[in-house]
Amino acid sequence: MRRAAVVGTGAIAAAHAEALRAAGERVELVAVVDVDADRAAAFAEEWNVPRVHPTSAALLEAEDLDFVHVCTPPRHHVPVALDCLAANVNVLVEKPPALSLSGIDALIAAERRSTGRVATVFQHRFGPAAIRLRRLAAEGVFGRSLVAKCDTLWYRGDAYFDVPWRGTWDSEGGGPTMGHGIHQFDLLLSVLGPWQEIRAVAVRQARDVQTEDVSMALVTFADGTVASVVNSLLSPRETSQLRFDFERATVEVEHLYGYTDADWTVTPAPGHDEVVTHWHGEPSGIVSGHRCQLTAFLDALDSGEAPPVTLADTRNTMEFIAALYASAFTGTVVKAGQIGPDSPFHATMEGIGAPWANAR
């Protein structure tokens, strides 16, 4: 049985605790950490966790752990993960795993010195339908990829940003591009592979925040696919949509925070009805989410492999975000690999600064 701990007992921690409980005898949640002692105690009581520690340092000193779930506000993700790696403990870190490319690069360097490994929570990669889509696409069942779109159209009112760490570059690293749409376009990237260049806009339309509340991007992929990506927190009819137009079929999903097979549709091109047969050959009612990724994480630990999603995978998604902001704020096309350590967008997603007044 693996031994796990949770650092940060805010809202998302419940999804992690539920996934750990669903894993049964494969793992035991032995301890939790939170700066708010009362909240930590309440969480420990609710999820039957035997011990509470005041800091991640105290946790790592006192406990013999296989891995730690990092569920703190985003600005603390890298410091906690670095502490875990220094103690040779594996890490499963919530999105965004870092506030910048430089933060990701610091984790990559620390991981090289550690026997621990870092995996990022991008749970929508692990739903059965997404796994099937990647496999069938790789096998050539759908033919060449041509066009795609990725929309995260959510709604967060003014009250949502009353939490002090929300809506700031220093605490969240960005707006809906960084903290909300990241799940959908990470899934897009996992299907379409390397991206080549981005043309983007980011604006602050309605919310009293430092960051954007809407961003849009046109993306060209290495295989020639062209895609649009929209991230919004101003959309009253909330939805998460992905569409892939291949030579032989259109594959679509519409959901909000998690999908099953019922949320996906496959429309064959004329003369290619066999594509639908391939798709429906492996039906599943499983909901994409933390349970699916935790299962894959535990399977990797058991087999001695690097747990998914690796830091190399994560860096590709984070570079995409940095390039989107760089394109939006400079008004230029940004290519993959262009944002190096000498770029202002390497150290912070804000880069040269947003074009609007940068104050709440």
Image: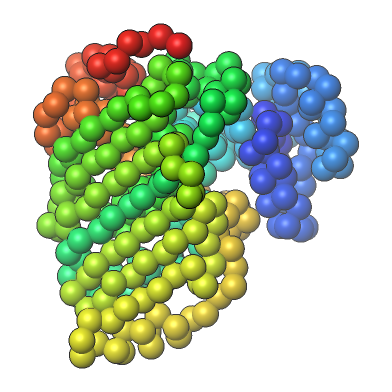
Image position, residue 184 (x, y; %): 40, 50
User: What colour scheme does the image use?
Assistant: rainbow
> Toward which corner of the image does residue 158 lie, by quadrant?
top right
Residue 342, visible in the rendered structure: yes
How many marks are shown on the rendered structure?
Answer: 0
**Quadrant the C terminus occupies:** top left
User: Residue 338: where, in percent of width, then height?
Assistant: 15, 30
x 19%, y 46%: residue: 219
Q: Compared to 163, does 156 lie above or below?
A: below
Residue 250 pos. (x, y %): 29, 72
Residue 337 in view? no
At which x and y percent is residue 174?
A: 40, 26
Picture quarter containing residue 131? Answer: bottom left
Q: Residue at x 32, y 44 (%)?
A: 230
Which is nearer the eye, 316 or 348? 348
From this view, report whether residue 207 is shown above or below residue 132: above
Residue at horizontal 24 percent and vertical 67 percent from the top:
245
Is 83 left or right of 337, judged from the image as shown? right
Q: Is residue 261 above or below residue 158?
A: below
Q: Nearer the viewer, residue 299 or 121?
A: 121
Q: Is residue 259 left or right of residue 352?
A: right
- Give the camera-side residue of 28 and 97: 97
Q: Is residue 287 left or right of residue 183?
A: right
Q: Please name the residue shown 31% across and 84% down the image.
A: 275
